[in-house]
Amino acid sequence: MLTLPCPFCGQRDETEFLNTGPTKPARPSSDVTDSEWINWLTVPVNPVGYVEEKWWHVKGCGKYFTIKRHTVTHQIKMPDEDSA
Ligand SMILES: [Zn+2]
C-alpha cells in the first residue's frame, strides 16, 4: 500500500488521493517544428526513474501538491529533495 506525504496533513493512505498526472515540461518556444509541438502536446513523459506528479488530497484537506515518485519502486520524494 502506498502512503503519500500531504504537506498539509502528513502521511496518508493513497486511497485519500487522486493522481492528476505528471507535471508537463515547460511549454516550448514558438519556433519549434510541428512534430516537436505535437510531441509536447500528446506524448506523456514516462521514464524509468523519478517523475513529478500532481496529487489532489480529495478525501482530506482538498489541496493540490507536487511530489516526485519513482516509476518502478514508488519511492516518494518532495520536489526540492535531491533526485539521486
Ligand atoms: Zn492534505
Image (tube, rainbow, N blue to C red):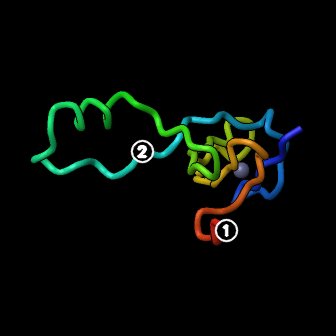
Query: Helix or strand or loop: what does disc 1 sit on?
Result: loop
Q: Viewer-nearest of labels 1 and 2?
A: 1
**Nearer to me, 2 or 5:** 2
**Nearer to me, 80 or 58:** 80
Q: Taking 41 as reference, is 19 left or right?
A: right
Q: Residue at x 63, y 35 (%)?
A: 19
Q: Residue at x 60, y 48 (%)?
A: 63
**Nearer to me, 83 or 81:** 83
Residue under pointer 1: 84
Decide: is 41 above or below 11. Answer: above
Amino acid type shown at disc 1: Ala
Amino acid type shown at disc 2: Lys
Q: Which mark is residue 49?
A: none
Query: Helix or strand or loop: what does disc 2 sit on?
Result: loop
Residue under pointer 2: 24
Quadrant position of residue 68: bottom right
Residue 3, x across and y down, in percent = 83, 46
Decide: is 2 above or below 66. Answer: above
Q: What is the quadrant of the N terminus in the image?
A: top right
In primary-sequence order, the first of circles 1 and 2 is: 2
Q: Residue at x 59, y 63 (%)?
A: 79
Q: Residues within 10 Å of mark 2 (few under 14, many from 20)?
A: few
Q: Taking 40 as reference, is 19 left or right?
A: right
Q: Which residue is situated farthest in the right direction here?
A: 1
Q: Which residue is situated farthest in the left direction here?
A: 31
Q: Are marks 1 and 2 in contact (CB under 8 Å)?
A: no
Residue 26, x across and y down, in percent = 33, 52
